[in-house]
Image (cartoon, rainbow, N blue to C red):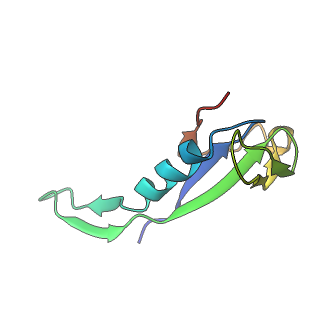
Amino acid sequence: MPPPLKLAVVLFDRVTLLDVIGPIEQFGFLRESSSSADIETDLVTLSIEYLGPTRGPIKTNRGPAVLADRAYDEVGGDERFDILLVPGGM
């Protein structure tokens, strides 16, 4: 089984919550495919990190706050993500 894909979700003040949660929900349907026959196999595993201007709660444009695991400046220069999700907002 391959290692999990690293997904970074970029949060910011007044982010649209549906633009965060909707794509993450869809990523849950990703499957590995066999190169020989394009046969779907195991679900892809994701490692998700929420990044914000600061750690902790980030206000959404409507509704509950989302918690940032790390601040933008805590991401190392040599650190890489497989997927970078930049949601919409105000």
Q: Is residue 63 left or right of residue 1?
A: right
Quarter that holds the C terminus: top right
Quarter that holds the N terminus: bottom left
Q: Nearer the viewer, residue 39 or 66?
A: 66
Q: Nearer the viewer, residue 34 or 13?
A: 13
Measured as percent of width and height from the top left, residue 81 is found at 60, 45
Q: Is residue 47 visible?
A: yes
Residue at point 70% right, 38% down?
Answer: 61
Which residue is at the far left? 37
Residue at point 70% right, 44% down?
Answer: 79
Which residue is at the far top? 90
Residue at point 48% right, 48% down?
Answer: 23
Which residue is at the far front? 62
Measured as percent of width and height from the top left, residue 49 is found at 68, 54
In the depicted structure, whether residue 72 falls above or below residue 48: above
Measured as percent of width and height from the top left, residue 21 is found at 55, 53
Measured as percent of width and height from the top left, residue 82 is found at 53, 46
Q: How many marks?
A: 0
Q: Is residue 11 left or right of residue 7?
A: right
**For residue 41, which quarter of the picture?**
bottom left
Q: Is residue 29 left or right of residue 21?
A: left
Residue at point 69% right, 43% down?
Answer: 62
In the depicted structure, whether residue 42 falls above or below residue 61: below
**For residue 67, which quarter of the picture?**
bottom right
Q: Is residue 80 visible?
A: no
Q: Nearer the viewer, residue 83 or 51?
A: 51
In the depicted structure, whether residue 25 falls above or below residue 13: below
In the depicted structure, whether residue 59 falls above or below residue 26: above
